[in-house]
Amino acid sequence: MSSQLPEATDAPVRTDFIRQIVREDLASGKHGAIKTRFPPEPNGYLHIGHAKAICLDFGIAAEFGGVCNLRLDDTNPAREDPEYVRAIQDDVRWLGFDWHSLRHASDYFGVYYLACEKLIKDGKAFVCDLSQEQVREYRGTLTEPGRNSPFRERSVEENLDLFRRMRAGEFPDGARTLRARIDMQSGNMNLRDPALYRIKHVEHQNTGSEWPIYPMYDMAHALGDAIEGITHSLCTLEFEDHRPLYDWCVDNVDLAGHPELLEPLATKGLPKEAAKPRQIEFSRLNFNYLVMSKRKLMQLVTDKLVDGWDDPRMPTLQGIRRRGYTASALKLMVERVGISKQNSLLDISILEGALRDDLDAHAPRRMAVLDPLKVVLANLDAAHTEMLRFSNHPKDEAQGMRDIPFGRELWIEREDFEEVPPKGFKRLTLGGEVRLRGAGIIRCDEAIKDADGRVTELRCTLDLESRPGMEGANRKVKGTIHWVSARHAVAAEVRLYDRLFRVPDPDSDADGKTFVDHLNPDSRKVVTAYVEPEAARAAPEQSFQFERLGYFVADRYDHRPDAPVFNRSVSLRDTWAQKG
């Protein structure tokens, strides 16, 4: 597949520290071309945090005329699923990016194995019989050095024999590991003879039962970058302490100096590239009012606290896409957040604000009523119907106009009428007037109630001189409300989504509570609303501003013109700021 095109020349120049490193490397001649990769593990759905990494990996490649690979880190088959692989590819494409080459870590299992045989022959790796618990005991602590494994001084011949027997599947899971021989006294725990291979008799989605041993992430990641000729390996800050091990693997295997290690690539039709990549770390994307731990997200799904991985309240890319977030809004958010070396908890209003700004500029306007109260215009004939012209977007004439039916009976929002209005109320009151958006001024003459005293219908009079084009059309009244024609409106299911958690830090275990205790019981409400006919004809995933109500999207899966379903993406204003 092709890489992204370079950005337009009139785009603002970005000057974060990563781009500055890339510019310096190109200027010095260290690299003739830039090559990056996005390397997710297919053990879950991508979330908002991954959006930053995707935009950075693919964006920098595009900006500097390079390419970016999508590499699936499938080194732990017990936790991986083809469903996640499909979703990852879908998410990357949805964000507007395309990969130069689709790779899998499993493509390189043969190379990893030969690389480890080389390390054994060089005296830099050994087969260890310590159990997982014993390895932890021998490793030491942050303040105490580790101790050498009693198996550390095995001969090269014995290590090669044992490693090859591990490869042949002779030993059970956990019986042995291959470990790097580095330094058990190191102040960096990652350099205390880390594991390179472990025994796992697990079927792999790509390689089947070919391999009973699997490489550890740190080695596979480093050598995968080297194999692909990656120039800049961009990672989040938690990998900063792993960088010495990353460099150790690249330097001590030395693929560029030992091209024979790349021979297994030929059987897969892959190019024999090799380079020394540079790992650069940047801060993760963390927002309040969210959890992004895969374990916790999995718990929400398995305990049915949400409606699946693509529930619009979930921070997964599949979820927020269904919520109505656009790729351009996420890119805008990433641009506003910027790139730094300092982890911080960002306010979710940054994310929501980016969506509001994007949809305000691009989303067509429609009228809908979520909590309907009937209005009867008594001075119009029962059969009265006319079509009124409305702009699709007040700031974008290119979006054109549409016709909205208007008749004797209308739906308005219940909150737009008060029989006993509070101070400052500027909408409809008994005996008062209000402007119907684009239709004229009405006066409320009577409020009809049911046996419980609840208002069920308003009898009103339309000022015929205030109709569009009439002499009294500009007569001043205090308020303007929206409406839909009761005869022509289409009933729609509207899902009112809100933040999934009630508190800014749901991960906090204060007072013995878990993140589940902080779930917002009002994060999802479903109402039967009425929408203008043009809204019902929306395509799935089409976004609108429902005037005066917020931004809504036609559901990706459930919406049909004859049975419309809309999800609230975000309110017009940040109502949570008022709560605070």
Image (cartoon, rainbow, N blue to C red):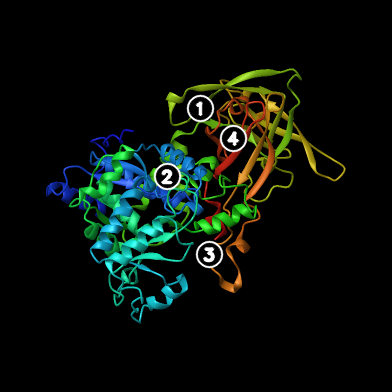
Identify the amino acid type marked 3.
Answer: Asp
Sequence-earlier tag: 2 or 3: 2
Nearer the observer: mark 4 or 1; the answer is: 4
Q: Nearer the viewer, mark 1 or mark 3?
A: 3
Q: CA distance from mark 4 to mark 1?
A: 25 Å
The C terminus is located in which quarter?
bottom right
Q: Position of residue 368 (x, y in %)?
A: 62, 34
Residue behind mark 2: 330
**Horizontal and vertical percent for residue 455?**
78, 41
Q: Position of residue 118 (x, y in %)?
A: 26, 58
Which marked residue is nearer to the observer: mark 2 or mark 4? 4
The three-letter code of the residue at mark 4 reads: Tyr
- Please say if 246 is above or below 446: below
Q: Position of residue 484 (x, y in %)?
A: 65, 29
What numbered label is drawn on residue 507?
3
Q: Are circles 4 and 3 on residues that touch, CB within 8 Å? A: no
Q: Is residue 119 above or below residue 354?
A: below
Which residue bears the numbered disc 4? Answer: 557
Q: Do we see residue 216 in this rendering?
A: no
- Extreme residue in the left direction: 28
Secondary structure, mark 3, is loop
Does dot 2 land on a helix, a strand or a loop? helix
Q: Residue at x 29, y 77 (%)?
A: 185
Of labels 2 and 4, earlier in sequence is 2
Q: Are marks 1 and 2 in contact (CB under 8 Å)?
A: no
Q: Residues within 10 Å of mark 2 (few under 14, many from 20)?
A: many
Could you tell me how far apart the alpha carbons at marks 2 and 4 are, in whole angstroms? 21 Å
In which quadrant of the rendered image does the N terminus lie?
A: top left
Q: CA distance from mark 1 to mark 2?
A: 24 Å
